[in-house]
Amino acid sequence: MRNPRAYCPNPDCEHWRDPAAPTSRPPPPIDFYRKDGYRRPKHNHQPVPVYECKSCGKKFSATLVKPIRHQKRPDLNRKIFALAVSGATVRRISILLGCDRDTVMRKIEYLGGEARKHHAKAMTKLAKEGGTSYVMFDELETFVHARHKQLSVPVAIRVKTGHILALGVARMPSNMKLGGAGIQPLPPGGTNWTYNDRPKIVPGVFAQLAPVLKPGATIATDGEASYPKWIKQALPGVRHVVAHSPKETSLGRARKRATGEPRETDPLFAINVLFAKARNDLARLGRKTWTTTKSRKALENHLWIWVAWVNGYRLK
């Protein structure tokens, strides 16, 4: 990602620009600064150019306009990115890299934000190229803090490349006794987990697909009863195909191998394999794990880092 044009960090200078609204003022001239030596950061001691504003004399470094500005350990970003999508927990990452857990959490939040920026640019590029004609959609189930506090992760992928196009995180009513699934009074330690954000989040994920779908595109889902109305609401004119994955037992697969019978094909194979990879790559999504998600925001940041890994975005 190319760095934006430099500006003077002094708010009283004529060459200053607000980082939150860089287009609010015209950019400063290219030669508004002069070179003024180097500085050596503690994490790698590599020289970083220092510049001086010709107008006010304020000094600033080359990292002022980079996403890693104000970071003391930018060298950890790529390492944490690789470990976070390789099944390592926050605690294990902090032990391996010799840093604090709060540092790892801040880096994951930063990397999640960078992944969102890269994804927005990738979707804009895909839309300019004409979009895609076949998309597959499904939901992955997980939990926050306790297994009866269930979450849904709706995901849409482009089958041709396997890239993730859109995702979200929604609360869904619990189907467990501790979550109050028709049980009154609640068992000891239970929580009445009846929240349902899916009617809002899932149509929002469908709406994210609108700019990148070709006219008359096809979206394949399973037989969830609410999908047709949500797709019609968010994606008018898109062809909806309902498919069902075959349910085979290990005994049935063994019998077919012994007799030479062909196995049934899975029409949702692409997204089912993607979900299997997610449960392998992200410790918090494992079926049998001690790792738990403590907040939806942390889960979203981790998922967006994984999106960057799957789609091939280079995070720094």
Image (tube, grey):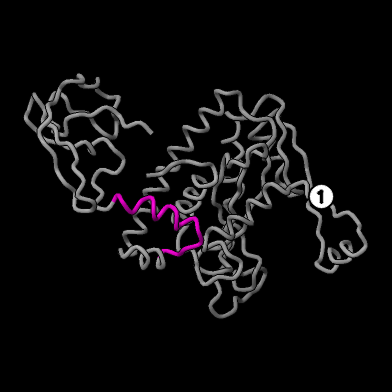
255 or 306, which is in the foreground?
255
Snapshot quadrant of residue 114: top left
- Magenta span of residues: 74-90
Answer few, some or many: residues within 10 Å of disc 1's Cα (few below 14, many 20 plus, some between 14 and 19): few
Residue at (91% x, 57% y) in the render: 261
Q: Position of residue 282 (x, y in %)?
A: 52, 59
Q: Residue at the spot x=45%, y=60% of the render?
A: 295
Residue appearing at x 45%, y 51% in the figure: 301
Does 81 appear in magenta? yes
Determine the residue positioned at 78% across, 43% down.
242
Q: Quadrant of residue 230?
A: top right
For badge 1, the amino acid type reads Thr
Q: Is residue 233 left or right of residue 149?
A: right
**Residue 150 location, quadrant:** bottom right
Relative placement, left or right, of 197 versus 270 is left
Q: Is residue 280 magenta?
A: no
In this view, 26 is above or below 180: above
Main secondary structure type of the part rendered in magenta: helix
